[in-house]
Amino acid sequence: MSEFDETYDFVVVGSGGGSMCSALAMRAAGKSVLIIEKTALIGGTTARSGGVMWIPNNPFMARDGVEDTPEKATAYLDSVVGDHNDTPGASRARRQTYVAEGPKMIDFLLGQGLKFTRVPYWPDYNDERPGGSEPGRTVVAELFDVNDLGPWKDRLRPNFLTLFATLDEALKLPTFKQSWAGKKVMLKVGLRTVFAKLRGKHYVTAGAALQGRMLHAAVKAGVEFRTEAPVSELIVEDGAVTGVVSEKNGAPSRVGARLGVLVNAGGFAHNQAMRDQYQPGTSAKWTNTAEGDTGEMILEMMRHGAAIAQMEEMVGNQMSIPPGQENDPVKPVVQGMAAPHAIVVDQSGVRYMNEAGSYMTFCKNMLLRNREVPAVPSWEIFDTQYITKYMLAGTMPGASKPSRWFKEGFLKKADTLEALASLINVAPATLRGTVDRFNGFVMKNHDDDFQRGDRAYDRWLGDAYHQPNPSLGAIDKGPFYAMPVVPGDVGTYGGVVTDIHARVLKEDGTAIPGLYATGVSTASVMGRSYPGAGASVGPSFVWGFVAAKHALATVV
Ligand SMILES: Cc1cc2nc3c(=O)[nH]c(=O)nc-3n(C[C@H](O)[C@H](O)[C@H](O)COP(=O)(O)OP(=O)(O)OC[C@H]3O[C@@H](n4cnc5c(N)ncnc54)[C@H](O)[C@@H]3O)c2cc1C
């Protein structure tokens, strides 16, 4: 029998999405929990993220009169994810468990005092498929006054959005020049900011609101946290995981776990060697995940016989990274790719996808295209209407951009398409032909090649104030521009295979006793697809909840 330096009922490796959810379930049953986090900050990439959870049939849909049922959600997942032999993380049984447990997880957290709501309109990413929801299935945390965390305030990982605005408001803000709705949101956020400052409040939003609220509830419930404490090993006795080795005050510490260990340690987006092995052609330089996303816990679980799957998958997020921002922790994503007056072409000047697809699909298309024609980076081609109306590489709408962008060749500009083509080494006739063809589709209001603008999702992502189709607008007003786009990501999406109880499985399909995993340390329940906003954070929470319930059920 192992000697432990200390023992808890449940030990969680990593402070990601599912960590505090599982810990709250454990504390509700009176069990002791330690969350061990490698970095100095709590919350993982989840705290940095949009904080959206994709939870079908969630209570806020019913509250707002938005129709959904488990059957409808299952039909959607059947259609989008489907049954495939090579995606064991997304088996039908796991998908059904996900649909059943999601609303229970939300109810549980509401019962713990968490304050959530939904984004009023955020279509599923394949809303046109059977069971797709046009209003969407999102759950988000309400704005959170981070001062409520008291001494824990500085230990929460910050979010990329520093505005005192909800995600819904932040999505509408860039339209302030075009619409009264945008101006109204701007005023509302401005007034909230002034009043908050007067009242000594500091609101955080998106993932920081989610993880801030979770941290607040967890600390109150007596969950223990240890930061700057990388876990290096799982302790295994007679085939069962009984604890972990982690650092404590700079020295190794053996921590026992009576009911089990939950790994919620993120993926391997910052591990270039693992990327080269499983996702060749992608780069750790193009990820927006937090720095702890280095994959060693996936390797450690593999060392103890865990099966892995879906390792080639990442949640791509198209990026244009301006000079000087290469090392920013959060690099600018291409905001307006579904907006009118812009397309994406490969390095031969040919269009090859529906640019308004989800970010995962966009980057998949780019990497697939690159197998035939150089397409990494691709070129975003747009005109003066686009640059004046929409955000570009993190800058607000308007034609004036940093001079460095032009000097260092990041943003190319020319009076004619032919001259622009020469600047990006594309045959002028090819680029002209591509743009003319697209403009022809705009004229007839239908993209015959890639059906851009057919789905509600494409139109929502476009420009609501551009008609008749919010995603289709001609590229016809010079000057014209080109900017490189790379297949960045917001996380990897493959990992260890887990069952309907979130137990880690071996190749032979048997569970490793005492070992659970959730989040992007696992092979996603969504397989190779991204059904809607929140398809990473949602599963991390749900499987954390499921793991805790299973571990508790083993108590005799
Ligand atoms: C800008 C941005 C926006 C996004 N928006 C959304 C969104 O709205 N909805 C959505 O679903 N997805 C979103 N994503 C993706 C999503 O945030 C991540 O995929 C998800 O948060 C991963 O959660 P997780 O629980 O698996 O792990 P994480 O939240 O990444 O947490 C893992 C933690 O484990 C720690 N860790 C790693 N190794 C060890 C170790 N050896 N010992 C101890 N600790 C360790 C890490 O430091 C980290 O803190 C977004 C991502 C980004 C970057």
Image (cartoon, grey):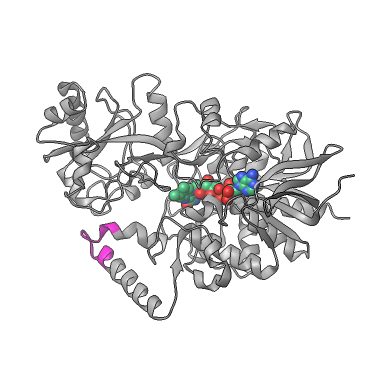
Q: Quadrant of residue 524?
A: top right
Q: Quadrant of residue 421?
A: top left
Query: Which residue in the rendered view is the most extreme toward the left?
Result: 415
Q: Position of residue 28 (x, y in %)?
A: 73, 65
Left/right of residue 414 with respect to residue 28 in the rendered view:
left
| Residue 176 is inside the magenta segment | yes
Residue at 59% in and 52% down: 16
Q: Is residue 312 visible?
A: no
Q: Quadrant of residue 105?
A: bottom right
The range drawn in magenta is: 174-183
Q: Quadrant of the N terminus?
A: top right
Observer-nearest of 79 and 283: 283
Query: Which residue in the rendered view is the most extreme toward the front?
Result: 250
Observer-nearest of 216 and 499: 216
Number of numbered tags placed on the structure image:
0
Query: Which residue in the rendered view is the most extreme toward the top?
Result: 372
Left/right of residue 462 with respect to residue 266 in the rendered view:
left
Q: Quadrant of the C terminus?
A: bottom right
| Residue 171 is inside the magenta segment | no
Q: Is residue 428 visible?
A: yes
Q: Position of residue 484 (x, y in %)?
A: 29, 34
Q: Position of residue 456 (x, y in %)?
A: 37, 47
Observer-nearest of 156 and 280: 156
Q: Position of residue 19 (x, y in %)?
A: 64, 54
Residue at 56% in and 58% down: 58
Dominant SS type (magenta)? helix
Image vertical order of residue 381 relative to residue 218, above or below: above
